[in-house]
Image: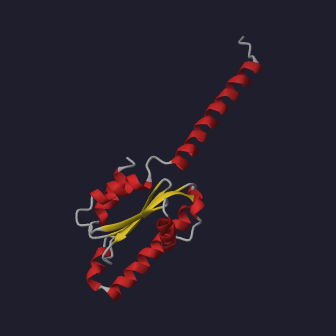
Amino acid sequence: MVKINRKKISLVVFLMVIGILSLTACGDKEESEGKYTSKEIYDKVSASITDMPEMTVVDNTTDEGKDSFTYVTDLEQDKIKDFVFAYSKDGKADEVVVIQLKNSEDLKKVQADLEERLETRRNTFSIYDAEEGSKFQGATVVKNGNYLMLIIGNQAQNGKYAFNDMFK
């Protein structure tokens, strides 16, 4: 007959639970820290778009960037890790926004804000400059983990592919 040592079994179960919890904690840390900066994503995405006009690029490290962020979402800036906002210097529709959030709980709100911005820009350009309207055919908001990206341009799908490819 096999004699069961309850203390040893309890210790083994306890160590297994601790191991599982530590793996879960590592997953949370990875989510909040992110694999890339928003600038790295922007650089890769913009390199995939061969017809992008000259862009003004701002980010969360400057006052201009922080002011521009309010055009994109009204989420408090302390809830983001970083962002890049690029828009055409000559008033064209082209635009790229990359946001890395600190917490995935804010994803739905920021995604809704980006989708609203996309729709507002689409409506504005349909009246203001109909030639630019074609750039909205492939325009999209995409997400991966704690990252969100809005992209408007003729080759937006190239940018979307580059974005998704970075997380494979």
Relative image position of residue 101 (x, y in whole percent): 53, 57
Name the residue at the left extreme: 50
Relative image position of residue 167 (x, y in whole percent): 40, 49
Image-quadrant location for residue 3: top right
Relative image position of residue 71 (x, y in whole percent): 49, 74
Q: Nearer the viewer, residue 100 or 2?
A: 100
* Horizontal side, residue 15 vs residue 65: left or right: right
From what the image shows, is residue 60 above or below residue 34? below
Residue 99 seen: no
* Horizontal side, residue 166 vs residue 3: left or right: left
From what the image shows, is residue 107 above or below residue 1? below
Q: Nearer the viewer, residue 37 or 118?
A: 37
Name the residue at the front extreme: 63
Point 55% across, 49% down: residue:
32
Point 29% across, 85% down: residue:
130
From what the image shows, is residue 16 above or below residue 132? above
Q: Nearer the viewer, residue 112 or 33?
A: 33
Point 54% across, 65% down: residue:
108
Point 33% across, 76% down: residue:
93
Image-quadrant location for residue 41: bottom left
Total number of numbered labels?
0
The quadrant of the image that shows the N terminus is top right
The structure's colour scheme is secondary structure
Relative image position of residue 141 (x, y in whole percent): 41, 66
